[in-house]
Image: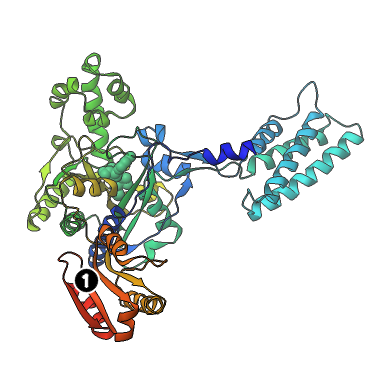
Amino acid sequence: MQGTKMAEKRQFHAIKGVRDILPPESALWNRVEAAAREVFAAYGYGEIRLPIFEQTELFARSIGSETDVVQKEMFAFDLYGSRELEKWRGLVRSGPHPKDPLSFQRNFVELIKHWKLAFEQDRLERTTSDVQILQGLDEVNKELLRVIDSGAVGSSEWARQVERGSFLAADLQIGQSVVLRPEATASVCRAYIEHGMHTLPGNVKLYYMGPMFRRERPQKGRYRQFYQIGAEVLGQSDAPAIDAELIEMLVVFFERAGLTGTTLAVNSIGCKECRRKYVELLRAELLKVKEKLGADSQRRIETNPLRVLDSKMPEEQAIIERLPRISDHLCADCRAHFAKLQEELKLRDIQYEINWRLVRGLDYYTRTTFEITAPGLGSQNAVCGGGRYDGLVELLGGPPTKGIGFAIGTDRLILSLQETGKAQATASLDVFVAWMGAAAYPAAVRLARRLRGERLSVEIPAEETKFKKALGLADKLRARHAVIIGDDEVASGQFTLKNLATGEQEKFGEAELVEFLKASAKA
Ligand code: HAM
């Protein structure tokens, strides 16, 4: 009994870095997301709904194994709970122990046992190849027992079976590590390849919205579960007009969402060839000033010198400003691409600034990179980031493909709207139906249903409530109108309507009342 009482008292909290989004704020989220859907549809994008978790390897390969996201921030877990399997497989693969060769067969039995268990518990995918391998393991086990029985341990037949068993164990698809997605570009490319979307006509334009997960240090505008609204264009062309149109769509969306005061920064980080040369030059220059840099930048000289340009450390700023700039080292094609992008932006009247240090934190970018900052966000002021990633699809095993896209941090967009006073709260309730009396109740229920059928939002007390109290609640709920229905109103067929903002009251028959409320909800 005492245990139950203790359990009752326990309070649960959302864990660090994740949060609930409650009404009325969630209505603002819905408005922002609806605006995105509208604008993206106008630009010919279709929605892609992606899985929340994917193979770890997908992100490691796309984002880059040396990036912060992959090194420190991914929430990984073992999908098949296969630690036990991995252990026995390791033992089988290491072969017979010189002092106890028979242990090989015992390990083999354990591997088969745990493998079958994982199958039964549905912890493994039933791929045909695994089922065949499992049959093979069973056969090898029988052969091993036969060799042991005939006293031929150590013979060439024994060695043959041991080798066959190890190969089979190596082929088992075991222990797939998966992560909660830290971003969605890699997933979009994976899906593009998986569904053969390169055969679709024209450019493939997709958008997505949903939660992403990064184990970052939580602070204002930075969460461990955060939301993105993103879009990607994949296809055969890398024309700068595609980049510019994508940015135009962003600008239109921000306008529609009511976000103002944003700044767009663009840059080109070159293609594989010119960037490689620039990175070498940058590394050489950084080595000359290594002692003056902080530990992170010193490490990055080796792992990813471009990221040094991202540094926010005040002591490093003067040094960075003197480093060679990529714009002076772009190849002719990349230089032309960047120049044309700027023309295309001007053609669209899009204000931008060039930030030569904008290299972005993910490795897949080529040529165009961009970032949008918004007011009211403090240090985490990037509300959107994006860029070109030609070659990423190929890197993931698909056909040669060009790509560009962006992701908006929805949490930050909302925060910026709130902090700059653009998130006006709208009354969420159109009508409060106050009723009293046995005859009034059924009339009130019917009226509420009719109004809701007209898409008005309506609240009706579940228990009889004195009018004064009911109207007080209607006020607190910020309803626009209250309908007052007592037995007298039912008898006369005339309902009293009260405007809760002005206090005015008027009587209506039911049909006129419905028409009046419909009209005023639209206004
Ligand atoms: P990203 O710059 O890593 O790019 O993220 C895009 C945006 O997501 C950021 O500008 C920020 O607004 C938001 N964001 C990132 N981390 C957090 C966090 N911990 N808390 C709150 N908001 C956050 C990408 O994810 C790329 N996939 C964008 C892209 C699409 N590039 C090409 N296509």
Residue 154: x, y in percent? 83, 29
How are the residues colored? rainbow
Quarter-of-image position of residue 176: top right
347 or 433, which is in the foreground? 433
Q: Residue furthest top?
A: 291
Q: What residue type is disc 1 on?
A: Lys
Quarter-of-image position of residue 447: bottom left
Residue 355: x, y in percent? 14, 38
Viewport quadrant of the N terminus: top right
Quadrant of the displayed image that contains ligand 1 = top left
Residue 224: x, y in percent? 38, 39
Name above or below for residue 482 compared with residue 36.
below
Q: How many marks?
A: 1
Q: Residue at x 25, y 65 (%)?
A: 38
Element on which disc 1 rests: strand
Q: Would residue 196 appear left or right of 481 to someone viewing this image?
A: right
202 or 465, which is in the foreground? 465
Q: Residue at x 17, y 44 (%)?
A: 374
Name above or below for residue 149 compared with residue 234.
above
Q: Would residue 72 appear left or right of 155 to someone viewing this image?
A: left
Viewport quadrant of the C terminus: bottom left
Residue 312: x, y in percent? 21, 28
| Ligand 1 contact, mark 1 (Cβ < 8 Å) | no
Q: Which residue is mark 1?
A: 498
294 or 334, which is in the foreground? 294
Residue 67 in view of the camera: no
